[in-house]
Image: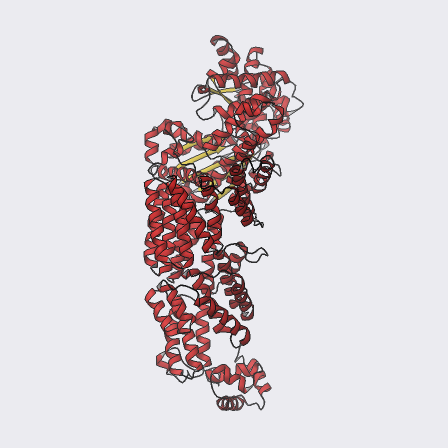
C-alpha cells in the first residue's frame, strides 16, 4: 500500500456540507427537516455524514446513528431505529430514556430492546404498531427539548418495510421539533421495482424534505484526494490514469492507490476492490471471508466461535486486516468492513461449498449462544444463515421462529415475508408440521392475518382461499368461520360484493353460544348497524354481549357495548348512547384497554354534538386527544377524536378553526377512513363558503364520483350532501334535485340528528329552492321526506330544530338554532322564512328576517348564503340595512335606473314575460308594466329587445 489508505483531507464536499449545515440550522430554528442524500456506492456518503456529525456535535447537537443492513431485506425489522435507541440507552441509561416517554411507553419500546423490560400485553395489532410509531416520535420530540437532534440513517435502500413506514411517519409528523433526519441511499441500486422508490417519491412531496445528490469527484478533487493519501502531490499522468479508471468514485481512488505505483490497474471494479484483500496473508483472507459471511458487522466473540482459531491466531489475522483498512474496530468489541462494497466483493468470492459451510456455522453458533449477536436479532440472523446455507429443514424451522418474533414487534410485512418462505419450503420438508408444531393451514391462516395487518389484500385473499380449500366445515366449523370472516374483511377492503353473505355464512357455522360465535356476531352485528339494519344488528350484538358476559370476556364486552351504543346513536336515542359509552369506558379503564376507553370517548363526543351540546363535545374531545397521546394511540384513535372535534366546530359555525384543525390532523397521517371523514367535514365548510375547487377535490378523494356506491349510511349520505352542495354552487339545481331523489330512494335514513335528520333537512331545503323549477318532482320528494320524518324519533334539540325546518316552521327553527349556537342553519332558516313571507306578500316580515340572516352569513364568510339573501332582497325590493328604508336604495351614479328597475331589466333581458317577472319578484303584473315603461323611457328605446341590447351595451346588467 502506498501512503495512507484513506485521505486525511476532506475533499470536494464543502458545498454539500454547507447544505447539511443549513438544513440543521433550519431544523433548529423553524421546524423538523428530512434530507434524502443519494449517491452511488463508494461516492463518500458515509464520510460526508461523519464530518457533518462531528461538526454538529461540537455545535451542541445530539447525534444518533442508525444504519440499515442487508439482513433487513430478509425480515430484520426496525434495525436503524433499534441501533439509534440502543445508542441512546448506552449514553443516558434506560431509566432516563423511559422517563421521556408517556406512562407505560417504555413497554412498547421493549418490543425492540429488552433493556426496557417486559413488552406491553396489548396484542391489538391494528393499533399497537401505530402506538410504537408514536412512542418513537414522542421520544425524538422530548429528546429535542433538551438539545437539537440529528438522526442519521444510512443505506435505506436496505431498509425493511417497517423501517420505511416509520421513516415516512416521522417525516410527516416531526413538525415543530428541532430534529434533522438524514437518510442515505445508493441511487445506482434503485431499480424500477425497488420498494424505496415510492417512499422517496412520497417524501419528496412533503414540506421540510430536501433532496441532495452527492456527485462524483472532479479531476482536481481526485488529485487532492491522492495527495492526501500519498502525502505529496501526485504526478499528472498518475492523476489522469486514476481519475479515468475510478471515474471520480472516492472508494475506487483509494483502491487504485493501494495498488502502488508499479501495480497494473485491474480490469474490473470488482477486481479493483478485491485486490486490496488478495494482497493480504492467506490466513487474514480466510478470516475476512468468514467475517463477510457474518455480514458487514460481526462481533469478536462470534467471529472467534465460527473461525475456531486460537485467540492469538485470530488477533494476528485481524490486526493485518485492520492495518490495511479493510476492517475497522467498532463499538462493542465488533468489526465492520470499511465499506459495504468491500464486504460484498469478499462474500462474492466464496466458493459454493464454502458459502454453505460458513453460513451453517454462523447459524449453529448463534443458535448455541444467542448473546453473540445484539439482543432481538438472533432469530432473524439464524433464519438468514440457514436460508443462505440452503438447509431446507432448518431454514423452515428458523423462518417460522423469526416470523413469531416479527409478530411481537408488529412488523407485519416482515412476518409475511418469512411465512411465505415457510410455505415455499413446506413441500421440501416431509415432516414440516411435526417440526414446527402446526399444520400447513395454520401457516396460511397466520399469513392471511399478517397480510391483512399490512394491507396486502390480494395476497391475503389468496391465503384465505388456500386455507379454506384445506378445511372441512363439518369437522372444523369454527376455524372455517374465522377464515370466512377474514375473507369478508378483504372483500370489504376491495369494495367487492359478498361481505354480508360471508358474515351470515360464518354465523351459521357457529350456532353454539361460545366465544367463537360471539366474535362472529360482533362483526356481523356491527356491519348490519353501520348498514342501517338496526333491529337485526342490535339483536345479534345483544346475543354476543350475553355470551361475552357469561365467559367473563370484559374486553369483548366493552367492544360490544360500544357497538350497541352506535346502534342507539344511529336510531337517534342519544341519551342511551351516552350511557352505554360511559359503561364501556368504565370497563376499558378497569381492564386497561386504551382502545375501548378512547373509542367510548370518541363516540360520546359525537353524541354530545348530536345532542346540541357541541361546546361540551369540544372539551371532551380535547381530553380524549390528551389521553390518546398518553396511551400512544394518537395517530389512530386520537385523530378520529379530533375529527369529531372538527365536526363540532363546523356545527358551531367556527369554520376557520375547523379548517385549520383538519389540515393539522391530516398532517398526522391518519388512517384512510379517518382521513376521508376529515375531508368530508372540510367539504361541508367548502359548501358553506362556496369553495368549489376544495369541494371537488374532497369528492374526488373520497370516491364520490366513482361508480361503486358506499356500503354504509354515514358515508353515502355525507357524499350525497356534498354532491348536492357542489351542484347548487355550480348553478345546477335540477342536478341537485336528482341527487336528493336518489338519496331518498336508496339511503337508510335513520333518526340520528346529525345524520338522518340532517339529511331530511337538506332534502327539505332543496324542495324550498327548486320548487318553482320542478313542482311535481318536488311534491313527490316532499311526500317521501314527510313519510320518513313521521317514522323518526325526535330525541334531542338538534332533531327538533331539523323537524321544525322540515315542517316549514322556519321562525321556530331559526330560534331553535339560535339557542343551540349554530348560526349557519339559523341564517338558512331565516332565509327560508323570508322567502315564505315574501310569497305571502309580507314585505316587512321578509325584510326583518333577511336583515337578521345577512350579517350572520357575512360573519361566517358564507358567501353563497349571503348572495342568496341579497338576491332575494333585490327581488322583493328591500334594503338589507334599516337605514335605507324599505323602498329600495337609490340607483348608482352610473345607472339611470333604480335597483328594482335593474332587477326587472335583468329578467326582461332573459326573455321573461311580465307575468313571469311578477311571480319571480313577488309583485303584481301591473307593477311590472309600470317598471318596464319607466325603463324604456329612461333608456330612450321603444321595445323590450332594444332595452335588453342597451342594458348590455351600457353594462347595466351582468
Q: Is residue 300 left or right of residue 816?
A: right
Tell me, yes or no, if residue 632 can be seen here: no
What's the residue at 47%, 68% (across, down)? 787
Residue sitting nearer the eye, 829 or 740: 740
- Residue 340 at x, y percent in the picture: 55, 26
**Image height of 395 relative to 316, above or below:** below
Q: Is residue 753 visible?
A: yes
682 sits to left or right of 195: left
Residue 645: image x %, image y %? 38, 54
The vertical placement of 845 against 496, above or below, is below
Q: Is residue 615 above or below residue 418?
A: below
Q: Nearer the viewer, residue 336 or 389?
A: 389
Horizontal placement of 830 versus 199: left or right?
left
Measuring from the top left, give residue 763's x and y in whole percent.
Answer: 48, 68
The structure residue drawn at horizontal position 39% and vertical position 72%, both measured from the top left corner, is 853
For the residue pair 460 and 705, the one nearer the viewer reads as 460
Q: Quadrant of the N terminus?
A: top right
Amino acid at each position: 500500500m502506498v501512503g495512507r489508505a484513506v485521505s486525511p483531507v476532506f475533499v470536494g464536499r464543502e458545498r454539500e456540507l454547507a447544505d447539511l449545515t443549513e438544513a440543521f440550522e433550519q431544523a433548529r430554528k423553524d421546524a423538523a427537516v428530512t434530507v434524502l442524500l443519494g449517491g452511488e456506492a463508494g461516492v463518500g456518503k458515509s464520510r460526508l455524514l461523519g464530518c457533518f456529525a462531528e461538526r454538529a456535535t461540537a455545535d451542541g447537537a445530539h447525534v444518533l446513528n442508525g444504519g440499515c443492513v442487508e439482513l433487513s431485506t430478509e425480515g430484520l425489522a426496525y434495525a436503524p431505529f433499534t441501533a439509534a435507541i440502543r445508542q441512546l440507552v448506552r449514553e443516558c441509561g434506560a431509566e432516563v430514556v423511559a422517563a421521556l416517554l408517556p406512562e407505560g411507553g417504555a413497554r412498547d419500546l421493549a418490543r425492540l430492546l429488552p433493556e426496557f423490560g417486559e413488552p406491553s400485553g396489548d396484542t391489538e395489532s391494528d393499533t399497537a404498531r401505530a402506538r410504537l410509531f408514536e412512542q418513537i416520535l414522542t421520544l425524538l420530540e422530548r429528546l429535542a427539548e433538551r438539545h437539537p437532534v440529528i438522526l442519521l440513517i444510512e443505506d435505506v435502500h436496505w431498509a425493511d418495510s417497517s423501517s420505511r413506514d416509520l421513516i415516512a411517519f416521522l417525516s410527516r409528523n416531526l413538525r415543530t421539533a428541532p430534529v434533522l433526519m438524514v437518510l442515505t441511499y445508493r441511487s445506482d441500486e434503485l431499480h424500477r421495482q425497488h420498494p424505496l422508490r415510492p417512499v422517496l417519491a412520497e417524501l419528496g412531496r412533503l414540506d421540510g424534505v430536501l433532496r441532495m445528490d452527492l456527485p462524483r469527484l472532479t479531476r482536481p478533487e481526485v488529485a487532492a484526494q491522492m495527495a492526501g493519501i500519498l502525502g505529496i502531490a501526485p504526478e499528472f499522468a498518475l492523476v489522469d490514469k486514476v481519475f479515468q479508471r475510478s471515474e471520480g468514485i472516492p472508494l475506487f481512488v483509494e483502491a487504485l492507490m493501494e495498488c502502488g505505483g508499479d501495480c497494473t490497474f485491474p480490469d474490473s471494479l470488482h477486481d479493483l476492490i478485491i485486490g486490496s484483500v488478495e494482497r493480504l496473508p492467506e490466513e487474514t483472507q480466510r478470516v475476512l471471508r468468514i467475517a463477510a459471511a457474518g455480514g458487514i458487522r460481526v462481533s469478536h466473540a462470534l467471529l472467534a466461535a465460527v473461525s475456531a482459531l486460537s485467540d492469538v491466531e485470530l488477533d494476528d489475522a485481524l490486526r493485518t486486516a485492520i492495518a490495511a483498512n479493510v476492517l475497522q474496530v467498532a463499538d462493542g468489541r465488533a468489526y465492520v468492513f470499511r465499506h459495504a462494497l468491500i464486504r460484498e466483493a469478499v462474500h462474492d468470492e466464496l466458493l459454493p461449498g464454502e458459502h454453505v459451510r460458513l453460513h451453517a456455522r454462523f447459524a449453529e453458533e448463534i443458535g448455541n449462544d444467542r448473546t453473540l449477536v445484539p439482543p432481538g436479532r438472533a432469530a432473524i440472523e439464524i433464519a438468514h444463515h440457514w436460508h443462505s446455507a440452503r438447509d431446507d429443514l432448518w431454514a423452515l424451522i428458523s423462518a417460522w421462529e423469526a416470523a413469531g418474533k416479527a409478530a411481537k414487534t408488529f412488523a407485519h410485512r416482515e412476518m409475511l415475508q418469512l411465512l411465505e418462505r415457510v410455505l415455499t419450503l413446506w413441500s421440501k420438508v416431509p415432516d414440516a408440521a411435526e417440526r414446527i408444531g402446526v399444520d400447513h393451514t395454520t401457516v396460511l391462516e397466520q399469513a392471511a392475518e399478517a397480510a391483512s395487518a399490512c394491507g396486502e389484500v390480494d395476497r391475503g385473499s389468496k391465503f384465505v382461499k388456500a386455507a379454506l380449500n384445506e378445511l372441512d366445515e363439518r369437522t372444523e366449523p369454527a376455524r372455517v368461520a374465522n377464515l370466512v370472516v377474514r375473507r369478508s374483511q378483504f372483500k370489504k377492503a376491495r369494495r367487492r360484493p359478498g361481505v354480508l353473505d360471508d358474515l351470515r355464512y360464518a354465523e351459521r357455522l357457529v350456532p353454539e353460544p361460545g366465544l367463537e360465535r360471539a366474535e362472529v356476531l360482533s362483526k356481523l352485528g356491527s356491519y348490519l348497524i353501520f348498514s342501517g339494519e338496526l333491529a337485526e344488528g342490535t339483536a345479534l350484538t345483544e346475543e354476543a354481549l350475553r355470551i361475552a358476559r357469561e365467559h367473563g370476556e370484559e374486553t369483548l364486552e366493552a367492544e360490544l357495548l360500544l357497538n350497541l351504543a352506535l346502534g342507539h346513536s344511529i336510531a337517534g336515542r342519544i341519551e342511551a348512547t351516552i350511557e352505554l359509552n360511559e359503561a364501556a369506558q368504565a370497563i376499558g379503564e378497569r381492564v386497561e384497554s386504551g382502545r375501548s376507553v378512547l373509542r367510548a370517548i370518541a363516540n360520546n363526543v359525537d353524541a354530545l354534538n348530536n345532542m346540541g351540546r357541541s361546546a361540551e363535545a369540544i372539551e371532551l374531545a380535547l381530553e380524549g386527544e390528551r389521553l390518546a397521546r398518553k396511551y400512544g394511540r394518537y395517530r389512530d384513535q386520537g385523530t378520529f377524536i379530533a375529527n369529531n372535534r372538527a365536526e363540532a366546530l363546523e356545527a358551531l359555525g367556527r369554520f376557520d378553526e375547523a379548517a385549520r384543525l383538519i389540515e393539522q390532523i391530516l398532517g398526522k397521517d391518519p388512517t384512510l377512513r379517518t382521513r376521508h371523514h376529515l375531508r368530508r367535514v372540510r367539504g361541508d365548510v367548502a359548501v358553506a363558503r362556496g369553495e368549489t375547487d376544495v369541494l371537488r377535490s374532497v369528492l374526488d378523494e373520497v370516491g364520490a364520483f366513482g361508480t361503486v356506491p358506499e356500503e354504509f349510511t354515514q358515508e353515502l349520505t355525507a357524499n350525497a350532501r356534498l354532491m348536492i352542495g357542489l351542484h347548487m354552487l355550480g348553478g345546477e339545481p335540477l342536478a341537485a334535485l336528482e341527487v336528493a331523489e336518489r338519496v331518498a330512494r336508496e339511503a337508510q335514513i335513520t333518526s340520528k340528528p346529525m345524520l338522518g335528520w340532517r339529511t331530511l333537512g337538506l332534502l327539505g331545503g332543496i324542495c324550498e329552492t327548486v320548487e318553482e323549477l320542478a313542482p311535481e318532482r318536488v311534491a313527490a320528494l316532499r311526500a317521501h321526506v314527510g313519510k320518513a320524518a313521521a317514522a323518526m324519533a325526535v330525541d334531542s334539540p338538534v332533531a327538533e330544530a331539523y323537524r321544525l325546518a322540515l315542517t316549514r316552521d322556519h321562525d321556530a327553527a331559526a330560534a331553535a338554532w339560535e339557542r343551540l349556537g349554530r348560526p349557519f342553519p339559523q341564517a338558512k332558516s331565516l332565509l327560508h322564512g323570508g322567502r315564505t313571507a315574501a310569497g305571502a306578500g309580507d314585505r316587512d316580515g321578509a325584510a326583518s328576517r333577511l336583515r337578521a340572516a345577512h350579517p350572520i352569513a357575512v360573519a361566517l364568510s358564507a358567501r353563497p348564503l349571503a348572495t342568496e339573501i341579497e338576491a332575494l332582497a333585490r327581488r322583493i325590493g328591500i334594503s338589507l340595512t334599516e337605514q335605507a328604508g324599505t323602498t329600495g336604495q337609490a340607483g348608482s351614479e352610473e345607472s339611470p335606473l333604480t335597483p328594482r328597475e335593474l332587477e326587472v331589466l335583468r329578467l326582461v333581458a332573459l326573455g321573461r314575460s311580465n307575468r313571469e317577472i311578477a311571480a319571480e319578484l313577488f309583485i303584481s303584473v301591473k307593477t311590472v308594466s309600470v317598471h318596464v315603461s319607466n325603463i324604456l323611457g329612461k333608456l330612450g328605446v321603444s321595445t323590450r329587445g332594444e332595452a335588453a341590447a342597451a342594458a348590455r351595451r351600457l353594462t347595466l346588467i351582468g
